[in-house]
Amino acid sequence: MTGWCIFRRADNAVRSPDVPRRVILALLVVVLSASVVGLPRPAGASTPPPGSNAVMGFGTSAAVASGARPAGPVAGIVSTPDGGGYWTVSSAGAVTTEGNAANHGSLVGIPLAAPVVGMAASPDGGGYWLVASDGGIFAFGDAAFHGSMGGHFLDAPVVGMAASPDGGGYWLVASDGGIFAFGDAAFHGSMGGHALDEPMVGMAATSDGGGYWTVASDGGIFSFGDAPFEGSGTGGSVEAPAVGMASRPGGYWVAYGQTAPVSSVLGQQELLAILGYLPLEWTPSGFIWRWQTTPSALKRMWAPGQDTVVLRGAITAFEAHVGLPLNGAMSAAETADLQAAAADPAAGANPYGYTYAVASENIPETLVVWHDGAIVNVSAANTGGAGVPTQQGTFPVYERLRAQIMTGTDPDGAHYADPVQFVAYFNGSDAVHYIARASYGTPQSLGCVELPLGPAAFVWPYLTYGTLVTVD
C-alpha cells in the first residue's frame, strides 16, 4: 500500500500541503461483518475476526484494540484520556467498554426521540456524553451538561460530537458539516453551507481545544484551527463508509462500517440511502431522516428491511439515472449495477434531490410539492370527476413528457384528444399535467391531477422518475 491522500478541500478547511504518502499513524476500523469491501488497509492489517461487530487497532493503537466486539451496531467510539481503552455506544444508547474504560451508565431501556449517533468523554475519563441525531445531549458520570440542540430546528441531523480539553464544553457536528459549540468550546470553522461530496459522520478535537477534525463518510478529513492533517481514507467503497473518528496524540482513529448484502432489501435500502435516492441517511447505527420537515405521511410509508413504495420509488429513480428498465424492482442482475454505482458515487448518486408530492381531494383541491426538506409549491388542482375518480394511494412517477395529445373516451362515450403539457405519469393513465381549464380546485378531470400552466411548468422539473405522488 502506498498511502492515502485527501481528494477535496474548501477555503476554510485546512489541508497539509504535499502530504507524505504514508500510512496514518493511528487508525481504528470498526466493521459490521467479516471484512470491509474495497477499502485500502494500512500495512500489516489483517481481516477482522468474524462476527456482527469487531474493533481492530493499528500503529500505536494496536495494544488497545484487541478484537473486542461491541454490543450492537456501533454509533460512536471514543478513547480514554490515556489511550488505554475506549467506549463504544449503540444507536439505542448501550455503552460497551474496553481496556481501562469504565462504565458510567447508558440509555438502555429508555425511550429515545432520536437515535444516539456519537459520544465524547470527560477529561479524566470519569464520565461521558452521548448525543442523539436531533442534537439532544445525555450526560453521565462527571460529564456536565452545557446545552444541546434538542428541540431546535436543524437543517441536517447531528452525527457526532467532541469535548473540550477541560470538559467545560463540547462541539456537535451535523451531516452537512455544520458545527454547534457549547460551554467553553470555541468555534474554529465548519463546512456548513459548503457542498460536500459525502456527508459528515463524525469529529474529534485536538488536545488543547484549539481545533478539530471532521470526517466524511468516504473517509475524507477536514481540519480546522490547530488540528493537523495526518491523512485520510478517501476513495474507499461506499459499501464500507466511515462512521466516526477519535483522536489521540500523534494521529486519530477512523471507524468504518459495512452495508448489508446487496441481495437483501435492507442492503439495497442502505446503498440507495448512501447514494441519495431515499429521504434518509444511513450509517451502521441505523437510518436517520435527512430533514426534520419530512412529511409524516412519507415517514409512515417507510420501514427498514421491508419492500415499501418508498423503496420502489427509490429503485425507479436509480433505474432511470443509470439507464435500466423502469419497474421499481431490483432484479438479481440490477444488484450488480447498484454495486457498480456504489463503487463510483460520482456517477451513480442521485443528481436531482428528493421530491414528494401530495394531491389532496379536500375542497379546494391542491397539489403540494415538497423537495429536500421544504415545500416548493402549492397549487390549486383538479382530480377525477364523477365516474372517473383518481385512484387514491401512493405511486412513483414512471414516465415524463414535455407535451402530448391525450386521447381517450369520456364517461358519456365521446372521444377526446386534448393537448396537455408538463406531463408526469404516476399510475396507469393518471398523470400530473397542465390542461386549459376555466377553474382549478374541484374534481373535474378524467382521472389525472390537472394544474394551471404556471405551477405545472414549475413543478415538472421536480417530478423526476421515481418521485412519489400521493393522492388522498
Image (tube, helix red, strand yellow):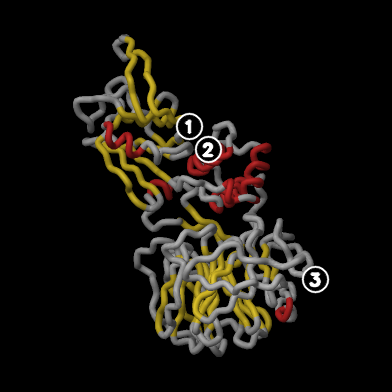
Please say whether residue 162 is visible from this viewpoint.
yes
* 306 to the left or right of 402: right
**Badge 2 is on which residue?**
316
Image coordinates of residue 137 in percent, x first then y, are 44, 74
Residue lying at the far front in this picture: please name it: 18
Image coordinates of residue 306 in percent, x first then y, are 55, 45
Q: Secondary structure at mark 3?
A: loop
Q: Residue at x 75, y 62 (%)?
A: 50
Camera-nearest residue between 453 and 4: 4
Other-residue count near label 2 (Cα within 10 Å), few / some / many at <14 / 14–19 / ≥20 = many
Q: Are marks 3 and 2 in contact (CB under 8 Å)?
A: no
Q: Earlier in the sequence, mark 3 or mark 2?
A: 3
Whole-Å distance between the Cαs marked 3 and 2?
Answer: 43 Å
Whole-Å distance between the Cαs marked 3 and 1?
Answer: 50 Å
Q: Secondary structure at mark 2?
A: helix
Residue 398, numbered label: 1
Camera-nearest residue between 209 and 289: 209
* 459 to the left or right of 194: left
